[in-house]
Amino acid sequence: MANSRLAEGVSREQLVQYVADHEIESSTWDLVRHHTVTEYVFKVGASPGIVLFLEADSETAAQEIVNALPVAELGLLAFDIDPVRAVAHF
């Protein structure tokens, strides 16, 4: 699971304006089409962003995937990776 947060120094208003001015990139939608991202939800309220459930071989691979997203490359969002699975095997 990749849970976004506003990058340091970025205001809620800056992210909201970016989203209003830009459509979601086709490269981002490719992650959904190719089932790399299996589910996603948009966070609203005081701390907007996105939570992605994705398939990756490792935490490092997951971090590389989200770091390549335009909102991360532009320094608007940062992502924390939390490994999860459907079955409770710790």
Image: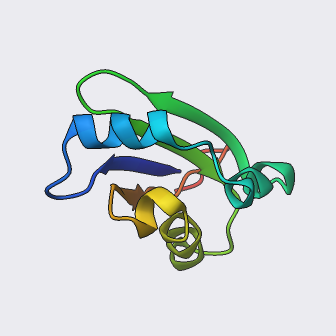
* Left or right: where 32 falls relative to 90: right
In the rendered image, the residue lying farthest to the top is: 45
Taking depth in this image into account, of 25 and 66 the one nearest to the observer is 25
Residue at 24% of width from left, 36% of height from top?
A: 12
* Left or right: where 32 falls relative to 2: right
Which color mode does the image show?
A: rainbow
Residue at 53% of width from left, 64% of height from top?
A: 66
The location of residue 88, given as percent across then percent down, is 59, 45
| 31 to 6, vertically: above or below | below
- Counting labels gives 0
The location of residue 78, given as percent across then percent down, is 34, 59
| 22 to 26, vertically: above or below | above
The image quarter containing residue 23 is: top right
* Left or right: where 3 falls relative to 47: right
In the rendered image, the residue lying farthest to the front is: 21
Residue at 46% of width from left, 33% of height from top?
A: 20
The image quarter containing residue 40 is: top right
Residue at 79% of width from left, 57% of height from top?
A: 30
| 30 to 20, vertically: above or below | below
The image quarter containing residue 76 is: bottom left
The location of residue 32, given as percent across then percent down, is 77, 49
The location of residue 64, given as percent across then percent down, is 54, 75
In the rendered image, the residue lying farthest to the left is: 9
